[in-house]
Image: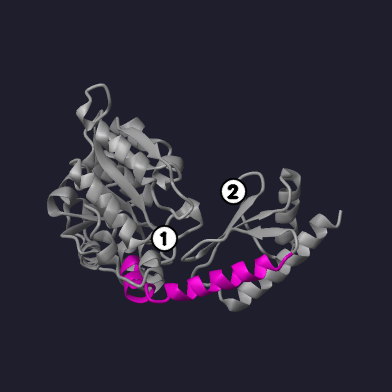
């Protein structure tokens, strides 16, 4: 990727004149089965732009209660877009509660409420253990939304992980949605960047909103060059990350005091908790891991997420499991 960045042919992407950006966008559109694509700085920007294109001010976007766009994106759609973010329950499978979803969609005929303009999906689903959400559920949600005249956006930050886990391709998953975003900077191993894909009309409107949000970049080919390498060389190897995550989950599950969250269709994430509910114990566990050369972030008082990716091989998994066993032993031995 560094070599590709150094060799990249550059132009001014604000005017659509960077050939490397244009090539990446064409690749992204083709892989997702959409007409066009737009390079943006981050997944958060991609999702915000998508919501703002689909939702006029004062309408509502319906999304999961555990969705990244609802929980982790600073309320941007409400602050910047004037959009009413309306959550419905996420099940442990990452699916939306279809009964709640139908109820929210059904109020479109009542003038008292913000009118539904969009239903947002997420796949893989971060807060539900990194699970790959079944294609059949996505199709059901899309059908419900379209019967009520609402668009569908797919937050596919790890879209290719989902496709591999579900034994399908990215275009099939994206086919359930009017627009889709995916990140270059996660399992695809790039330093920065995301793609937003949709119809030509959608991307034309998205281009203007990218400018409004300060996301217009000049010689952005230095970012796009790494993205091209990623799409050419990093997609197929994601299966290795899934196998490593499975090995990590199995190893941690054998450690006394560690409880691993069980998920169907595991991808590259492992969520786990320690026995008890003591924040001090969790902090000590982190410190003991760090002392043994393993860094991990907490997700609350006593919850942790480990993510496998390029550069984490099976020997690293074995070292992490051994370190976790030793750290847990220190914490629970008093």
The image quarter containing residue 278 is top right
Q: Secondary structure at mark 2?
A: loop
Instruction: Kindly identify the residue that appears in the image at 25 percent across and 57 percent down.
Output: 176
Instruction: Kindly identify the residue that appears in the image at 66 percent across and 66 percent down.
Output: 252
- Dot label at residue 299: 2
The image quarter containing residue 233 is bottom left
Q: Nearer the viewer, residue 120 or 57?
A: 120
Residue 104 is situated, as x and y percent measured from the top left of the image, at: 31, 35
Q: Nearer the viewer, residue 222 or 158?
A: 158
The magenta span reads 226-255
Mark 1 or 2: the one toward you: 2
What residue is disc 1 on? 185
Report the magenta stretch's main SS. Answer: helix
Q: Does the residue at mark 1 contact the one at mark 2 (Cβ under 8 Å)?
A: no
Q: Secondary structure at mark 1?
A: loop
| In magenta stretch: residue 245 | yes
| Left or right: residue 152 compared with residue 87 | left
Q: Residue furthest toward the front?
A: 99
> Label 1: how many residues lie within 10 Å, few (<14), some (14-19) or many (20+)?
some
Q: Nearer the viewer, residue 213 or 276?
A: 276
> Label 2: how many residues lie within 10 Å, few (<14), some (14-19) or many (20+)?
few
């Amino acid at each position: 990727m560094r070599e590709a960045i150094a060799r990249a042919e550059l132009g001014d992407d604000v005017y659509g004149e960077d050939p490397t950006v244009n090539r990446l966008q064409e690749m992204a559109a083709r892989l997702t089965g959409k007409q066009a694509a737009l390079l943006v700085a981050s997944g958060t920007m991609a999702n915000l732009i998508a919501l703002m294109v689909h939702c006029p001010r004062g309408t509502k976007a319906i999304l999961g209660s555990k969705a990244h766009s609802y929980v982790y994106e600073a309320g941007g759609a409400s602050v910047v877009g004037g959009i009413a973010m309306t959550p419905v329950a996420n099940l442990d499978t990452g699916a939306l509660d279809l009964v709640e979803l139908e109820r929210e969609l059904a109020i479109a005929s009542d003038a008292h409420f913000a009118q539904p303009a969009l239903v947002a999906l997420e796949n893989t689903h971060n807060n539900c253990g990194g699970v790959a959400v079944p294609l059949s559920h996505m199709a059901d949600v899309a059908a419900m939304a379209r019967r009520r005249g609402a668009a569908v956006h797919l937050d596919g930050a790890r879209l290719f992980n989902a496709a591999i886990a579900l034994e399908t391709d990215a275009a099939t998953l994206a086919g359930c949605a009017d627009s889709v975003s995916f990140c270059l900077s996660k399992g695809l191993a790039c330093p920065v960047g995301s793609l937003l894909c949709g119809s030509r009309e959608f991307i034309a409107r998205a281009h203007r909103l990218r400018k409004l949000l300060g996301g217009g970049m000049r010689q952005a080919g230095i970012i796009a060059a790494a993205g091209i390498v990623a799409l050419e060389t990093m997609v197929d190897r994601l299966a290795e990350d899934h196998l490593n995550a499975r090995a990590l989950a199995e190893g941690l599950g054998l450690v006394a005091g560690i409880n691993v969250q069980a998920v169907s269709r595991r991808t590259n994430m492992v969520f786990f908790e320690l026995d008890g509910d003591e924040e001090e114990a969790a902090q000590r566990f982190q410190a003991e891991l760090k002392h043994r050369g393993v860094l991990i972030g907490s997700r609350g008082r006593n919850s942790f997420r480990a993510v496998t990716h390029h550069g984490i091989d099976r020997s690293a998994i074995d070292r992490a499991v051994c370190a976790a066993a030793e750290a847990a032993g220190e914490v629970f031995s008093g």
